[in-house]
Image (tube, rainbow, N blue to C red):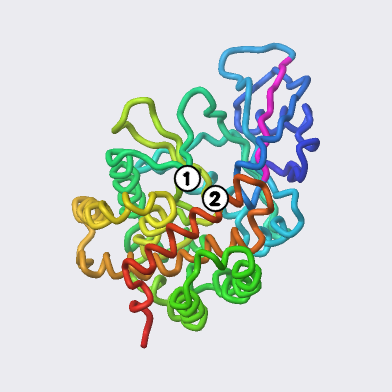
Amino acid sequence: MSDLPIPLTAEDFTPDWLTAALRSNGTIEAERVVSVEATPMGEDFGFLGSLTRLVLTYDRPRGGAPATLIAKFAAQAEFNRDFARQYGIYVTEARFFQDLQPSLTAMPTVRAFYTGYDSAVGDGVTILEDLEGKLRIGDQMASLSQAEAEQVVTQSAGFHATWWGKADTDELAWIPRTDGPVWQMAPATLQQFWPVYQQNFGHVLTPELISAVERTWANMDWVFKRFATPPVTVIHGDYRLDNMFFPEREGDPITVIDFQLMARARGPYDIAYFTSQSLDIEQRRATEQDLVRRYHDTLVAAGVRDYSFDDCFEDYRLAILWCAVFPIGMGGGLAGDSERHLELATEVSRRCFTAISDLDAVSTLPS
């Protein structure tokens, strides 16, 4: 939205910087930010970026000037920051808010007051609405009601239907494709995590699961191409409970955040990621057929054709296998050593690898 420098630390969000950022899109006019209290939001939020709550004081406060904001910017851990820059995720999220969010109606998301990015370096910043006290943030370590799970799936289908069969356009070329250069880096990166993951989380693996993961690495190019084969849409890419804010009344829209891992791919990826890593094992086992059916029915109701439920469920099973990259990434180094992140890596591993076994997901790979 402007040519302001990209902040890399909480101290970079100065009164002058925030005044210029908020004036750049008319959020404030004559008033100035005269002081900023920046409070890091702690270890429980994210792996690849930093979140800081900003409390603002103005010289002439008026209605409509935000009192608090959430700043999202580069991770402070060098390894995580370099990983995120390599995959362009800070730029992807900033461009989501600039290019897609203004016209998005199928999935509520947080308001962005300012976005900026530097494609050459790979840095980006988003200044977001503070939802604390307005909505309840999801917890991936917990679970949710069946009605809430259905709402999550329905909104995902609406999001996917918006770009179903229309994602390969010049206007969306900046969004990574799963068969493109960004995703092609993944196998080598993940294989670096794999020995560390086995050392730390080998207790959740069986010889069959180790074989399944290693077969997936060997076939990763095929998997990427499969998910980039039409019908292709825009996927969220990190569709889990920690990235959702829930309303007080069940059935009302759920606000979704964090579009850093957005990509162009087959839609069931988001559903598989959600069910295999945000639902406890028994809830997933009992409801996944119904949830995938709801997802497919919603696509059809939105006008999607030539995509059968059987094809949808086969893509779902393959995506379950692919989604093993997330617990491996967390447990292999990205999550750090905080108690909450280690607990999350353990539980997500248990859920994901159980889903792989339950669905015989490895059989979706070429023989």
Identify the residue at horizontal 42%, vertical 69% (top origin): 321
Identify the residue at horizontal 33%, vertical 45% (top origin): 155
**Residue nearest the observer in this picture, 184 or 310:** 310
> For residue 88, which quarter of the picture?
bottom right
Q: Quadrant of the C terminus?
A: bottom left
Q: Which amino acid does the dot numbered 2 rest on?
A: Leu
When the figure is inspected, residue 132 is found, relative to residue 291, above or below; the finding is above
Give the labeled residue for mark 2. 344
> Residue 140 shows which numbered tag?
1
Q: Secondary structure at mark 2?
A: helix
User: From the viewer's perspective, is 215 left or right of 312?
Assistant: right
Q: How many marks?
A: 2
Spatial CA span between label 2 and label 1: 8 Å
Residue 184 within the segment the image draws in magenta:
no
Residue 51 within the segment the image draws in magenta:
yes
Residues shaded magenta:
50-58
> For residue 316, which quarter of the picture?
bottom left
- Residue 334 in the image: state x and y as whole percent: 65, 58
Contact check, label 2 and label 1, Cβ < 8 Å: yes
**Residue nearest the observer in this picture, 159 or 323:** 323
User: From the viewer's perspective, is 142 left or right of 271?
Assistant: right
